[in-house]
């Protein structure tokens, strides 16, 4: 790609998508979440805004779900028996301790810091018959680094970073940081050599109800598994186990699109992250070996999270609005947007979808939204690989992360850490970690002038 491909002057409001040859109308693009789920609150509470025009009952359930999302669960038995039963092993004691202010977590600043919002999956590279990742016979599917007072936690993980130095073609230096993870103080038994740790950071949760309502066919229309159009991009849908329907369904949520619905995502987090049972997952992630070491069982009920509580917190997450785009009248925004398309970012970060028409919450239906994600899996190269297959996702594949709201993470969560493990310190570093199917776009980005790179980053920060 040649430098100077885009002037920083006047840019047309309608572009031509060079990959699909269709006109792209940006006349409503400020409304990231459509008519009802676009918020103009750009404060530290930007990700916690209720969608518009909910019914009185839906608003009541939203507030009840908000309370549950932020409340600390405690050991059973407790005086408030509707909020007890956490553990015996867990990573967090509330949803909000990982998704602080409904936002995004970050790795600890120091090697020994507490990793709230960052956890580690365990994998063997072996998959179950339905494609689910194989679990460790003692530690299960993830390291739980907290425990009740007289219970042994599973382990802790120390994070260090290797500093990697590079130079843009124009001579500007840049730095990337490669994380290294070391398991410390295993509480039950050393991990066998064949097991590997796979980090996962907690992302922001605004806008999930809109993603849940994108028609399945609209997502599948962007698949190109064999790269028949020859653009180097071969998006692939993940199909995962659906605990409600007892079969395989399209995956939409999670870093590898390994969850089919917000309901199952929430129930899975209660179970794995907090040690709380639900009707979807009635068994705690607590192996026979661990039970033999710690035979005491403190149940907060069967299940510990009632269906009513799970429904409330699911409605809450489902109806969180997404902040509107900012700076769309700025020339730098228009220039950056044009570059975004020119170097192929939109091939994975699909700008717009229209939601379906069958959701029980009517305001989620028929909305033109701008998530900048195709919700498909893409090979992102060896540098970002975790080696953990997850249903149809390989160890190098990740779901395209939605970009909406990305520029407000600093306002809400006081950091700018990005990617699945938070290794990127900012948007620029996140782009520079792209490889695999995104290698050409990353290379084209490096060949831009400093002014053009600034414009593209300005555009992404405005989403």
Image: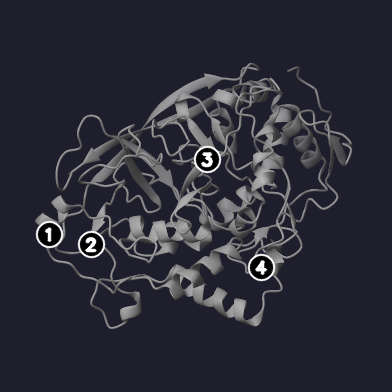
Which residue is tagged 1? 294
Q: Earlier in the sequence, mark 1 or mark 3?
A: 3
Q: Residues within 10 Å of mark 1 (few under 14, many from 20)?
A: some
Q: Of circles 4 and 1, which is in front?
A: 1
Residue at (67, 78) in percent of width and height: 55
- Residue situated in front as seen by the camera: 277 or 11: 277
Q: Earlier in the sequence, mark 3 or mark 2?
A: 2
Using the numbered discs, state the Cα–Cα distance from disc 3 to disc 4 in whole angstroms. 29 Å
Residue at (87, 40) in percent of width and height: 14
Q: Are marks 4 and 1 in contact (CB under 8 Å)?
A: no
- Is residue 372 among the parts visible in the rendering? no
- Residue 114's place in the image compared with 320, above or below, is above
Which residue is tagged 2? 88
Using the numbered discs, state the Cα–Cα distance from disc 2 to disc 4 in whole angstroms. 36 Å
Tally the numbered discs.
Answer: 4
Q: Are marks 2 and 1 in contact (CB under 8 Å)?
A: yes
Q: Residues within 10 Å of mark 4 (few under 14, many from 20)?
A: many
Which residue is tagged 4? 51
Q: Earlier in the sequence, mark 2 or mark 1?
A: 2
Scheme by which the image is coloured: one colour
- Residue situated in front as seen by the camera: 234 or 340: 234
């Amino acid at each position: 790609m040649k430098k100077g491909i885009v002037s920083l002057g006047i840019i047309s409001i309608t572009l031509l998508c060079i990959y699909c040859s269709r006109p792209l109308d940006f006349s409503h693009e400020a409304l990231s979440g459509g008519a009802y789920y676009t918020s103009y609150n750009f404060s530290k509470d930007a990700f916690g805004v209720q969608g518009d025009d909910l019914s009185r009952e839906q608003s009541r359930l939203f507030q009840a779900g908000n309370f549950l999302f932020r409340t600390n669960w405690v050991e059973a038995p407790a005086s408030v028996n509707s909020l007890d039963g956490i553990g015996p092993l867990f990573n967090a004691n509330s949803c909000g301790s990982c998704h602080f202010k409904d936002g995004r977590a970050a790795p600890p600043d120091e090697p020994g810091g507490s990793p709230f919002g960052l956890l580690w999956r365990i994998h063997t590279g072996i998959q179950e018959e339905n494609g689910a990742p194989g679990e460790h016979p003692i530690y299960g599917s993830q390291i739980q680094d907290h425990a009740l007072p007289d219970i042994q936690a599973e382990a802790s993980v120390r994070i260090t970073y290797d500093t990697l130095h590079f130079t843009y073609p124009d001579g500007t230096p840049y730095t990337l940081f490669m994380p290294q993870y070391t398991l410390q103080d295993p509480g039950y038994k050393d991990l066998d050599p064949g097991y590997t740790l796979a980090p996962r950071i907690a992302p922001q949760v605004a806008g999930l109800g809109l993603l849940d309502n994108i028609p399945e066919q609209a997502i599948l229309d962007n698949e190109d598994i064999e790269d028949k159009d020859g653009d180097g991009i071969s998006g692939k849908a993940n199909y995962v186990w659906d605990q409600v329907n007892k079969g395989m369904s399209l995956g939409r949520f999670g870093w590898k699109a390994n969850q089919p619905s917000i309901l199952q995502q929430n129930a899975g987090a209660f179970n794995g992250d907090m040690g709380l049972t639900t009707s979807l997952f009635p068994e705690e992630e607590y192996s026979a070996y661990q039970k033999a070491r710690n035979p005491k069982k403190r149940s907060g009920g069967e299940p510990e999270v009632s269906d009513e509580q799970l429904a409330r917190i699911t409605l809450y997450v489902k109806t969180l609005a997404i902040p509107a785009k900012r700076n769309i009248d700025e020339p730098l925004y228009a220039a950056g947007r044009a570059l975004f398309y020119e170097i192929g970012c939109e091939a994975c970060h699909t700008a717009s979808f229209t939601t379906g028409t069958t959701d029980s919450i009517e305001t989620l239906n028929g909305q033109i939204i701008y998530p900048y994600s195709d919700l498909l899996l893409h090979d992102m190269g060896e540098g970002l690989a975790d080696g953990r297959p997850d249903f149809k996702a390989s160890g190098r594949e990740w779901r395209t992360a939605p970009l909406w709201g990305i520029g407000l993470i600093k306002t809400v969560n006081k950091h700018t850490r990005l990617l699945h493990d938070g290794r990127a310190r900012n948007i620029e570093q996140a782009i520079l970690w792209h490889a695999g199917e995104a290698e050409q776009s990353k290379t084209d980005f490096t060949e831009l002038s400093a002014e053009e790179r600034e414009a593209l980053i300005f555009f992404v920060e405005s989403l």
